[in-house]
Amino acid sequence: MKKVVITGMGVVSPIGIGLEGFWDACVHGKSGVSAVTTFDVSQYACRIAGAVKDFEPSQFIEKKKIKRMDRFTQFAVAAAKMAITHSGLDLTKEDLEKIGVIVGSGIGGLQTIEEEFTTLQKRGNRKVSPFLIPKLISNMASGEISIQYGFRGPNYAVSSACATANNAIGEALRHMRYGDAEIMICGGSEAAITQLGLSGFSQAGALAESYNDNPQKASRPFDKKREGFVMGEGAGVLVLETEEHARARGANILAELAGYGLTDDAYHITSPNPEGKSQTQAVKNALKDAHVNPEEVNYINAHGTSTQLNDKTETLVIKNVFGARAKQIPISSTKSMTGHLLGAAGGVELIASILSIQKGVVHATINYEEQDPDCDLDYVPNTAREWKVTCAISNSFGFGGHNAVLLIKAYDGHH
C-alpha cells in the first residue's frame, strides 16, 4: 500500500493566520475568543465567539473574485494557498490531472444565505444575487481551489458537521492509496458566526453562556465548570503526497498520515452515546488502518469541545482504547484557545498535532482550573510541555453521531 505523507499546511484561525502566528499562540496558550462585534448581540444568551481577526482576502484572492465568494470559501482558498506555498510544490512541473481537492464545510455559506434572504424580503426576487447559489454551496471551497490552480483530479466536499475536516483528509488519504491522485489538497473551512448561526447553536443549548464578560475563559475543555462550546471560524488545509512523489522532488516531509477510522453513533442528533462505543471503535479502526499498537500512541489531540457530555465521553473513549496507559498520554484540546471551528476543526487540529511532532512541544489545554472526577486524564493543563511526539491521534466527533479519527506518525524516511 502506498505511504502518504504531509508536505504542506495552511491555517486561518481565531488565534492566528499562517503557521507561525498560529503556533506561537498555541504554545503561549492565547485565547482567540472575544465579544461578537459584527452584528448586534445584545439580546443573545451567548455574545462571544472565536472570530478570525485581520483577515485580508486580497492577500490571497484576485480583487474581482472576492465578492463572488462567501467568507468560508475565502478562508479555504487562503489556507490552500499557504499550504501549497509551504509544500514547495512547483506546479509547472506537476501533472494537474493527478492533483485532487477535498475541502469540506459543515455549514457552507450561511452569511450569504442570510444576506440574500434579507434582500429577497426587502427588495424582491429580482434583486437576489446571481452568485447566491455558487456562494452558498459547501462544495465551492474545493471548486474554487481547483479553478485557481487547474487541479483536475478527484474533487468534492465532505459535510459531516464537526467531523468534516477529518473525513475530508481521511478520504483524500484513501484516494491516494487507491491511485486516484499523487497529491491531494484537503481539510475544512467554516464561517458561520452570523446572526442565524449564533442563534441556532444558542437555542440548541450548545454554547457557553456564563462567560460573556470574560470571553477568554469560556472554552474550558475537561474542566469541571465547562458548560458548552464557543463558536469559532477558520480553515485548516493540508497538502498530502504519496511518499514516492514527495521523495522524488526532494520535499520536506512533515509527518506520515498513517491511519483513518470512521463510525457513527446511530444514537442522537447532537449528543454522543454516553458509552462511547462507536467513538472507541473509530479510534481502534484508525490504529488498525495504520498498523499501530495502542502502546505506540504518545499524544492525543482531543475533540475536547468543552461541553459536559463530549468531554466526559471522550475521556471514557480514551480509557477504553488505551487502558491503564491512558493516564500517561498527554491530551490537549486546541478548542480551548480557538473555540470550536465546526467543519474546519479537524484540519486546524491536525496541523497543531503535526507541529507538535515537528517542534517537540505539545500545547496546553487552557482554562483547566478545577478537576472533574469524570475527566481524570493528563490534559496538559494551562502550560505547554516539551514532549517528543512520535505517533499522535486527532479525534473529531460531530452532530449526527459522525466520528472520524486520524493517526499521524513522525516520518523516519526508512522504507
Image: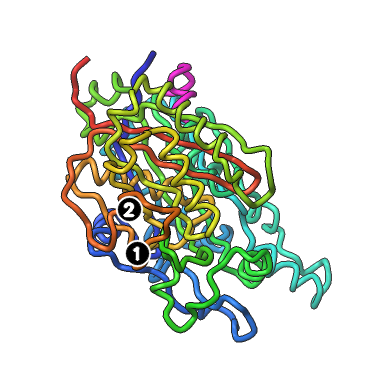
> Residue 85: where, in percent of width, then height?
30, 45
Q: Secondary structure at mark 1?
A: loop
Q: Given contact means CB atoms under 8 Å apart, are the residues at marks 1 and 2 in contact? A: yes
Place residue 217 in its image quadrant.
bottom left
Q: Secondary structure at mark 2?
A: loop
Please say whether residue 178 is one of the residues in the magenta stretch: yes
Q: Which residue in the protein does label 2 denote?
A: 379
Task: Depth check: give the residue in front, 268 or 92.
Answer: 268
Residue shown at the point (44%, 28%) measured from the top left? 286
Please say whether residue 316 is one of the residues in the magenta stretch: no
Place residue 119 in its image quadrant.
bottom right
Quarter holding the C terminus is top left
User: What amino acid type is highlighted by mark number 2?
Assistant: Tyr
> Residue 273: where, in percent of width, then height?
61, 44
For label 1, the crowd category at 10 Å Cα-Cα, with few meaning under 14, some 14 to 19 and many 20 or more, is many
Q: Which residue in the protein does label 1 denote?
A: 368
Residue shown at the point (24%, 56%) measured from the top left? 20
> Residue 104: where, in percent of width, then height?
54, 44
Give the number of the disc on residue 58.
Answer: none
Which range of residues does the magenta coloring cover?
Answer: 171-181
> Residue 49: where, in percent of width, then height?
49, 70
For marks 1 and 2 on the same chain, the one whose residue lies earlier in the sequence: 1
Cα–Cα gap, marks 1 and 2: 8 Å
Q: In screen coordinates, is 392 left or right of 213? A: left
